[in-house]
Image: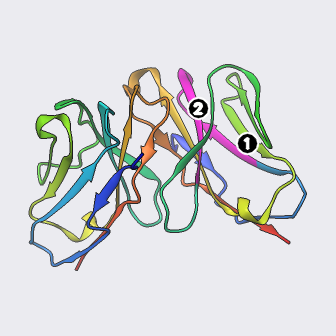
Amino acid sequence: EAGVTQFPSHSVIEKGQTVTLRCDPISGHDNLYWYRRVMGKEIKFLLHFVKESKQDESGMPNNRFLAERTGGTYSTLKVQPAELEDSGVYFCASSPRGHEKLFFGSGTQLSVL
Amino acid sequence: QKEVEQNSGPLSVPEGAIASLNCTYSDRVSQSFFWYRQYSGKSPELIMSIYSNGDKEDGRFTAQLNKASQYVSLLIRDSQPSDSATYLCAVNGVNSGYALNFGKGTSLLVTP
């Protein structure tokens, strides 16, 4: 069984540019989460999808971040325009039921210069 | 006050010893507690979950929860060098929906 897949694994962009991160959850997992770890800080929740619906986006930092999950399969997280403080590792996770067991992807390391 | 606090370490233990990892949380009504293991450059992996007071054992791992003290711990018996990793404590509260609050993690080093 394939795990949670994220790409790119690394992205280096300049301030003001746009970046789109993609996450492919485990097949059949309705719940999909985005988390972020900024250097030196803890992993922080960004948002939660159930199928294609956003259940909770309370962790999204501001309106420069847009997440979508069309068709309830893969998800994208777009940052536009990127700022220096957006640098960090963006993790995607999926689960079949709530938060009982999250399966994490290996993350996208985003560097905004 | 941080929602979930862990000592960042590194915690160094000799091979075969018991490693004790601790975590405190601030939300008194938290209900679900998890320990994730993360090897350097890899994704976090769930190793233990606990929901009620007391101990829960799974192989060499024991999770302990004390809701009155707002404290959760992870014991690793017979520590192996392959246990060297960062251990993340995660907590879910009643008002958190399905979001997990993570601690910064404790780095564990098991020396041969």
The residue located at (58%, 62%) in the rendering is B39
Q: Which residues are magenta?
A: B21-37
Residue B45 image offset from top left, x and y in percent? 54, 49
Name the chief secondary structure element in magenta. Answer: strand
Looking at the image, which residue sits at the far front? A1
| Residue annotated with mark 1 | B74
Asked if residue B29 lies in the magenta stretch, the reply is: yes
Task: Please indicate whether residue A82 sits to the left or right of residue B53 in the image.
Answer: left
Q: Which one is nearer the viewer's eye here, A6 or A111?
A: A6
Residue A64 image offset from top left, x and y in percent? 12, 54
| Residue annotated with mark 2 | B33
Task: Please indicate whether residue A76 sits to the left or right of residue B45 in the image.
Answer: left
Up/down of B103 relative to B85, above or below? above
Up/down of B18 relative to B96, above or below? below
The residue located at (69%, 34%) in the rendering is B71
Up/down of A26 relative to B55, above or below? below
Residue type at the position of mark 2: Phe
Q: Which one is nearer the viewer's eye here, A94 or A87?
A: A94
**Quadrant of the drawing holding the N terminus of chain A:** top left
Asked if residue B84 lies in the magenta stretch, the reply is: no
Up/down of B41 relative to B38, above or below? below
Q: Secondary structure at mark 1?
A: strand
Q: How far is disc 2 from disc 1 in space, using C-alphas?
A: 11 Å
